[in-house]
Image (cartoon, helix red, strand yellow):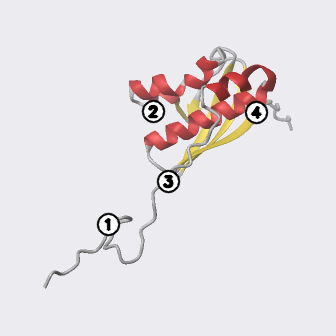
Amino acid sequence: MKKAKKIDYTYAVGRRRTASARVRLYRGKGENTVNGLPFEKYFDSPVFNAIWIKSFKQVDASDKYYSSVRVAGGGKKGQLDAVIHAIAKALAKAEKDKFRSSLKKAGLLTRDARIRERRKVGTGGKARREKQSPKR
């Protein structure tokens, strides 16, 4: 039985709201995939395609690395932000002395922790709404 070839990669997790992205960053040339689909098909908007490559362009590494991403939870925008965060973390881990400072300055390594505010008891269905008081 033939042994499978072991491919080296850098692993990182990125999160945004309820979306969580797990990234494997490989050195070399290859196709960037998200959940088994090419990046352009999964994030089909041209605006999204311009945004997701931001991490690679910041450190000028778009032709040196490619990624395989698993993302779950949230909506498309939250998933995209989680993927950007994970790719930036993986790049910083891959070549710490080269990439970390420029990614940090661009704000790509900071997790955006804003989440939906929970509903409070006695507010009539919303987080901050107060119940209407009867006048008579």
Quadrant housing residue 104: top right
Q: Earlier in the sequence, mark 1 or mark 4?
A: 4
Q: Amino acid at mark 1?
A: Arg
Residue 43's disc number: 2
From the top left corner, tell me how far across and down residue 85 is, in percent: 61, 36
- Give the spatial CA distance, label 2 vs label 3: 22 Å
Q: Is residue 120 left or right of residue 1?
A: left
- Give the spatial CA distance, label 1 vs label 4: 46 Å
Residue 22 lies, with reference to residue 38, above or below; the image says below
- Give the spatial CA distance, label 4 vs label 2: 23 Å
Q: Disc 2 vs disc 3: Cβ atoms closer than 8 Å? A: no
Q: Disc 4 vs disc 2: Cβ atoms closer than 8 Å? A: no
Q: Is residue 48 left or right of residue 123?
A: right
User: Disc 1 or disc 2, which is closer to the eye?
Assistant: 1
Q: Amino acid at mark 3?
A: Ile
From the top left corner, tell me how far across and down residue 43 is, in percent: 45, 33
Task: Please name the residue shown 72% across and 18% down the image.
Answer: 28
Q: Disc 4 vs disc 3: Cβ atoms closer than 8 Å? A: no
Instruction: Name the foreground residue: 62 vs 69.
Output: 62
Q: Earlier in the sequence, mark 2 or mark 3?
A: 2
Residue 89 lies, with reference to residue 27, above or below; the image says below
Residue 129's disc number: 1
How many residues crowd mark 3 within 10 Å: few (<14), some (14–19), many (20+)? few
The C terminus is located in which quarter?
bottom left
Q: Is residue 35 at least partly visible in the picture?
A: no
Q: Earlier in the sequence, mark 1 or mark 2?
A: 2
Residue on which the image places disc 3? 115
Task: Please name the residue shown 59% across and 45% down the image.
Answer: 15
- Give the spatial CA distance, label 1 vs label 2: 35 Å
Residue 10's disc number: 4
Q: Earlier in the sequence, mark 4 or mark 3?
A: 4
- Give the spatial CA distance, label 4 vs label 3: 28 Å
